Amino acid sequence: MATEGSERFDQVDWSDLSRSGRFDLSINSIGMLLTTLPLALLAVYDTQFIGDRTPTFEFIGLDRTFEAVDFFFIFTLFLAFWYLVLPLYQNPRMTRYYWKEFKRNRPAVVSMVWLGIVFVGGIIGPLVMSAPQQELLVAYQPPVFTSVVESTPATCVGEVMNGRCHGTWEYPLGTTNAGRDVFTMIVYGMTISMQIAFITTTIVATIGITFGTLSAYSGGWVDEIMMRFVDIILSFPTFLMFLLILYIYGGGLGMFIVVFSLFAWGGTARYVRSKSLSISEEEFIKASRISGASTYQVIRGHVVPNVASSIITQLTLLIPGFLLFEAQLAFLGVGDSTVPSWGQLISAGRSDLSYAPWIVLAPGIVLFLTILAFNFLGDALLDALNPEAEAESE
Amino acid sequence: MGFGRYVTARVLWAGVVSLIITTITFLLLSAAPNPDVQRAATQAALQGGDPAEAVERARELRGLDEPLYVRYFDFVQGVYTLDWGWSSSRSQPVIEAVGNALYYTAQYSIPWTILTVILGPLVGVYSAANMYSWRDHAATGFAFFGYAIPNFFFGIILLLIFGVWLEVIPIVYNTDVAVFSVENAIQLAIPVFVLVTGSIGAVMRVSRNESAEFQNADFMKTAKAKGVSPLRAYAYHVMRPTLVPLSTTLVGQLLALFLGSSLLVEVVFGIPGLGRLTFEALLSQDTNLVLGTTLFFTFVAVVGNLIEDLVFTVLDPRISYDDR
């Protein structure tokens, strides 16, 4: 899975390739630096120069506050753009090949579309839609095309026919017991889910790849100790430990993301280690060693890119677990109740389930579809990126 | 390394892991302010006493004024001699509370585990035998559905349909009925169903993919050529090698579900088992009970991983003990 290189051998720009010193930055890294710098400055400004309660964007008149999670989320978005999306554009031939392989899996394409909607909704939604406000007068509005007994909603916004209140397009998925629009809350929940997905993946990938390659290249007793450490991480009951941490210290979304990603990289590290051990036996590694590449250059230029493409699958399959944990914690009522996640919405609607089931059903189905989509996507990526794995299993 | 030495090393390692997790739990707890002490201070302040003095007394009462290492050794000793302290919210020893709760957890965990272990591989091998037929697609669809639907959400929906609308199951678990009675079977049917759909998907997928490999193996062709009946051929020549790789994922999968979902399912269905005990202990800030239930789940996980490793080496003679 070459991620670099030209289409034809005679067109390779050798002067370009030989510029592989440690301090020559690729266009991706330059872009990354250029975009991260303002973000870092903004973060410093937010934490050092203005008060805790002042909105981050007050200096341009916007009433919007950024938390640490938001800054980190944007950082991971930049990472994904410069090191995942842009390389795909830079290597059109491989992209076409991956797409051809990926396209054969119909459910995966549908999943991709759905995740795309969730992603775009999560990024743009909160910018164009104002946060759902409490309006007790319009509590318990039914979703559009459905109707409930007239006595359920406080006042019916739609038309009343035969003693039944009909839903309107003003509240397409109905409203909660506090009169908040369920659709808006789901869109806000998309942001939370995408934040969880992106940040945890970044942390898990960073620690997992570093730990795995280090372990593989150290060898001997260092390797042994590092792998035993991974054993402990893997047998750690994270969910319970997090409950314990919540009980003792309390904590919000940031705490959730940090704790869960710090205990989820065990499998990734193990996988990266075995993969890099097998890659370092390959001929091209030997060739580059003979040509005088240092261990750092070998790892950076050959091992990590080759490993990275195959752990994407594994990471994709980790995300649904995180989303599920968040929803479970929110449902138990021990999550951060100020975070507008899907799980919070499910737990908020639970007591009204028998007469206002849409409050639970709508976010529950969205959560279900998202988890399903990540699973399908992971399966398809496995086939597209690792043709050998497919050959083995067939 | 011989088998005996491997087992010894593995058991010792499990002991080390449990000790490390116990230590981390202890450090977490000792780094945080103790809610019992804070409560004592609040109470003293409300009654016009001196909060500082009350804190001092409460700390002394719980032995918190001793140096850290003394408390640590006491704690570890208590954990391993099953002296887990007194639960203030339930007014009984922690170990007794855990035992009572385990009684209810076992009532749904045992049928759930048995169903998953038996049905999962059977359906998986069946759908591999009929690969790409509509039955296979239906089984795959079901597997993905069960895998992706959040257990607690599924539980709520089923409770709404069967408990509230159809009224065929009680909404809150009734502890008065006998264990082996029809009423108990009815009220446990939905929780067991929810848990089985959650866990069976992964088992089905793994056994389907693994057994696909053995279907066209030479020994299958030989068996078919000899005229072995398909049922016998699948039972003896496909099922058995499939179970080996399956056993590695199975224990882990079941444990993960047991640790996470049993809590949710118990809260949704109102079963007074271990998960609910943990949850209620957290809500009522009963430190000893929180610790006890957490440690119990941890030990289950450690022992489960140990058994998984041992079973794997026994089942698959190709594994050399030196690699692991």
Image (cartoon, coloured by chain):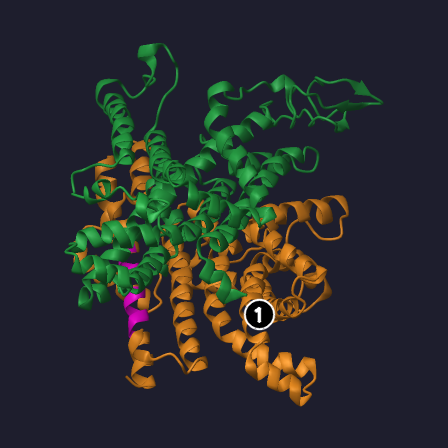
Can residue B87 be seen in this snapshot?
no
For disc 1, the neighbor class at 10 Å (few under 14, some 14 to 19, many from 20) is: many
The count of marks equals 1
Q: Nearer the viewer, residue B259 or A233?
A: A233
Q: Which residues are magenta?
A: B12-24
> Is B20 one of the magenta-colored residues?
yes
Residue at 27% in and 63% down: A283
Horizontally, residue A143 falls left or right of residue B105, namely right
The quadrant of the picture occupied by the N terminus of chain B is bottom left
Q: Main secondary structure of the magenta part?
A: helix
x and y percent of residue A121 in the render?
51, 29
Q: Colour of chain A?
A: green
- Looking at the rendered structure, the secondary structure element under dot 1 is helix
Horizontally, residue A211 falls left or right of residue B69, namely right
x and y percent of residue B26 in the render?
27, 55
Tag 1: amino acid? Ala
Give the residue at mark 1.
B212
> Is A217 one of the magenta-colored residues?
no
Can residue A234 be seen in this snapshot?
yes
Q: Chain of mark 1?
A: B
x and y percent of residue A280 in the render?
26, 62
Q: Colour of chain B?
A: orange
x and y percent of residue A267 in the render?
37, 58
Residue at 53% in and 22% down: A132
Name the residue furthest right.
A162
Name the residue furthest front.
A10
Residue at 38% in and 41% down: A91
Name the residue furthest bottom.
B226
Residue at 60% in and 19% down: A136
Find residue B105 and report its image quarter: bottom right
Q: Nearer the viewer, residue B240 or A295?
A: A295
